[in-house]
Image (cartoon, rainbow, N blue to C red):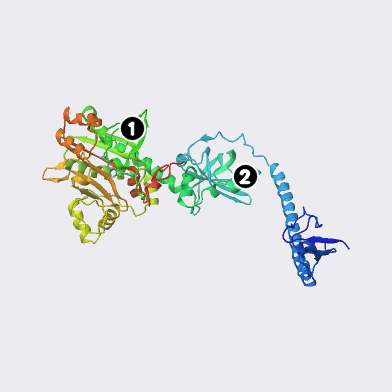
Amino acid sequence: MSSVYVNEQTGVDGPEVSGTEQQPFQSAAYAVFIQPESKVLIYKQLEDSEEFGYSEISASALKKAKKGADGLKKKAEKQAKLEEDQKKKEAENAAKLAELDLIKIEEDTSLPLAKKIKLRTIQENLDTRVVVQGWIHRLRLQKGVAFITLRDGTGFIQAVLSGDLAKARQTQELTLESTVIIKGVINKLPEGKSAPGGVELKADYYQVVGLAPAGEESFTNKVQENADPSLLLDQRHLALRGETLSAVMKVRASLLKAIRRFFYEEGLLEVTPPCMVQTQVEGGSTLFKMDYYGEEAYLTQSSQLYLETCLPALGDVFCVQESFRAEKSHTRRHLSEYTHIESELAFIEFDDLLSHLERLITKTVQYVLEDPIAGPLIKQLNPDFQPPQMPFKRMEYIHALDWLNEHGIPNEDGEKFKFGDDIAEAAERKMTDTIGVPILLIRFPVEIKSFYMQKCSDDPRVTESVDVLMPNVGEITGGSMRTWDYEELLAGIKREKLDLESYYWFTDQRKYGTCPHGGYGLGTERILAWLCDRFTVRDCSLYPRFTGRCKP
Ligand code: 4AD
């Protein structure tokens, strides 16, 4: 009788091992499974001895090993069956695919020439043979018919593939986000059936331009709806294709267009100030510093000072420019880079500035709501949105403190608000949400506002300043009248311990024909968060930048 060797410490269970004394197995069960006829020898301490060596397995251990070997046998049989089934399936699939390969998708050249269109024009092209190109947004494969929801950025359409078009291998292997060119006729859908735009494209020919991956690398694996926000931000380039994010980006485009329309109606001229600067506007703590050919420079925090220099040359001006803030605060309304809409108006008084802001917000919102693309998207994203009504509620800083104290909302130290306290984000939001309408919060104390703000003539402790507060977001705009007296401006610059010399070009404005003037800055992402009811401004920026995030 042959022997099989088992060593629990040094042995190995597997086909690469022979079960000899030189190559023992690890378990007795495996040894019995592989060599059921052999005598099993186990490596252990020998009876009545200090020595270790091989000796025959005990009867009880052998019984246990046989049981284990039965289990292993069943497992092996199951595995073999699985492999066989898999092989059979693969062979069947290959046969099926070979059959599908025989189906050729060919264009019927006797059909009328197809008109190339973008999906925003489908309603103007009913009953016409068209060619559309785009990305597969949704896909449903059924027996004998395939439904593709195509997206081209300007709209969506449902294409129906039937007959050979549906059966062909190319169709069976389609994936989400692949690009295709489809030809066919656009038909209005009968009552009761629904698809985007109430139409359907009956495809007569299509071709694949770029096939997106399936399996592990598939689009849906990369962008999972409920994934962690930071994972989704890593995949922002793909996530942007989603319906919600792309809707916000479309509203964003409409907002920028509407705001430019308003500015032109009000006679303002667009300028493009520099991003790389050597002066600060809103405090040194949020400056992004950089080395500029050996000199210290910053990424701009605000283009305000440059806009002020444009007034004598160009009259009232505005800009839509990126601003940069090295914010320490990690809040849902702070970005490190944001699109700053700023304007500056000459020969105005504080009240003119406030009514200009009211018009700016109400008119811009009106234009966006009237936009045939953005209007319906806002309804979808923010069904309860109420456009603001003029005049806005005006509230002085000092009265806001009273309101906060009356409502038991404490300051940052957990105490009652007193004159000079900053109204931090949480308190500001509580107040705005409770009041529930846009607020022009005005007349902030000198010490909590910037060096350039004009003091009120009836109370020099406060400034002609304004924050526009919106429910759900809080501050969306900050503005003020500017100190237009040369000496007073110098005092402000000194008070903030700024380097006077680097501001020569700014202070010159007060020398060479000064005038009362004012302006403001509006955070594009903040106004969008309000319009589109987004939780955070991060959802309103194409590629948001904030603490720790500068990619993709
Ligand atoms: O109140 P801020 O800091 O004012 C200024 O920069 C002025 N110099 C503007 C001017 O008068 N021309 O910023 C103005 C607006 C804020 O109300 C807010 O909407 C937005 O810019 N903002 C930010 N948005 C996103 N992330 C940040 N870190 C922001 N900081 C300001």
Q: Looking at the image, in which quadrant does ligand 1 appear?
A: top left
Q: Residue furthest right?
A: 1
Q: Is residue 391 left or right of residue 4?
A: left
Disc ID at residue 296:
1
352 vs 172, nearest the viewer: 352
Q: Is residue 145 visible?
A: yes
- Amino acid carrying label 2: it is Thr
- Amino acid carrying label 1: it is Glu
Kindly indicate the quadrant of the structure image that contains residue 10: bottom right
Disc 1 or 2, which lies upstream in sequence?
2
Q: Residue furthest bottom?
A: 60
Q: Quadrant of the N terminus?
A: bottom right
Q: CA distance from mark 1 to mark 2?
A: 59 Å
Say which element carries label 1: strand
Q: Residue furthest left?
A: 458
> Dot 2, crowdedness within 10 Å: few (<14), some or many (≥20)?
many
Where 504 sits versus 427, above or below?
above
Query: Disc 1 beta carbon < 8 A from ligand 1?
Result: no
435 vs 409, nearest the viewer: 409
Query: What is the number of callouts on the image?
Result: 2
Q: Is residue 428 left or right of residue 338?
A: left
104 vs 28, nearest the viewer: 28
Say which element carries label 2: helix
Q: Position of residue 439 (x, y in %)?
A: 24, 50
Query: Disc 2 beta carbon < 8 A from ligand 1?
Result: no
| 1 or 2: mark nearer the eye | 1
The residue drawn where x is 18% and y is 47% is: 445
Disc ID at residue 171:
2
> Dot 1, crowdedness within 10 Å: few (<14), some or many (≥20)?
few
The residue drawn where x is 63% and y is 52% is: 143
The residue drawn where x is 74% and y is 55% is: 83
